[in-house]
């Protein structure tokens, strides 16, 4: 399942993203009501019991303001931690260096 430190990392990532979004909001004349909406997907029934141990976790984010290629992005992993690691790396790369949270 999901480890406690991973939940804390996810909460920190969300907080950092929302902080940047609040600073960027004035630049966007038509922000969408779903900006910053995260979804976490757990393995489905068949993936959970698949003998090859493939577990498809995902983290999905709706975001127009900072995401450079559209509104939605999905990070997959064989664990929540793997999907989170991918999301953390990519989201933090979207944030310009001058706006990074220390």
Image: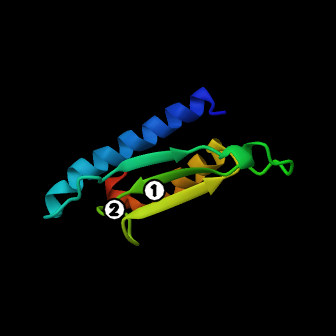
CA–CA distance in space, label 1 to label 2: 9 Å
Q: Looking at the image, tell me whether mark 1 or mark 2 is earlier in sequence order.
A: 2
Image spot of residue 52 (x, y percent): 85, 51
Q: Are marks 1 and 2 in contact (CB under 8 Å)?
A: yes
Image spot of residue 89 (x, y percent): 53, 55
Q: Which residue is mark 2?
A: 66
Residue in view at x 48 percent, y 53 percent: 60
Is 27 in front, or is 98? 27
Q: Up-down: is 90 above or below 48? A: below
In the displayed structure image, the side of residue 34 where residue 13 appears, left or right: right
- In which quadrant will I find the N terminus? top right
- In which quadrant will I find the C terminus? top left
Q: Which residue is mark 1?
A: 91
Residue in view at x 13 percent, y 64 percent: 29
> Around disc 1, counting alpha carbons within 10 Å, would you say few (fewer than 14), some (14 to 19), or many (20 or more)?
some
In the displayed structure image, the side of residue 25 where residue 85 appears, left or right: right
Please indicate, yes or no, whether residue 101 appears anywhere in the rendered image: no
Residue in view at x 40 percent, y 72 percent: 69
Q: Up-down: is 5 above or below 63? A: above
Circle 1: element type: helix
Image spot of residue 91 (x, y percent): 45, 56
Q: Up-down: is 31 above or below 55? A: below
Residue in view at x 73 percent, y 49 percent: 47
């Amino acid at each position: 399942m999901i480890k406690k430190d991973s939940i804390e990392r996810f909460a920190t990532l969300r907080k950092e993203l929302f902080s940047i979004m609040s600073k960027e909001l004035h630049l966007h004349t038509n922000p969408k009501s779903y900006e910053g909406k995260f979804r976490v997907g757990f393995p489905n029934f068949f993936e959970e019991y698949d003998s090859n141990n493939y577990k498809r976790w995902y983290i999905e984010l709706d975001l127009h303001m900072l995401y450079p290629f559209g509104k939605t992005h999905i990070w997959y992993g064989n664990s929540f931690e793997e999907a989170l690691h991918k999301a953390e790396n990519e989201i933090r790369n979207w944030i310009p260096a001058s706006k990074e949270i220390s």
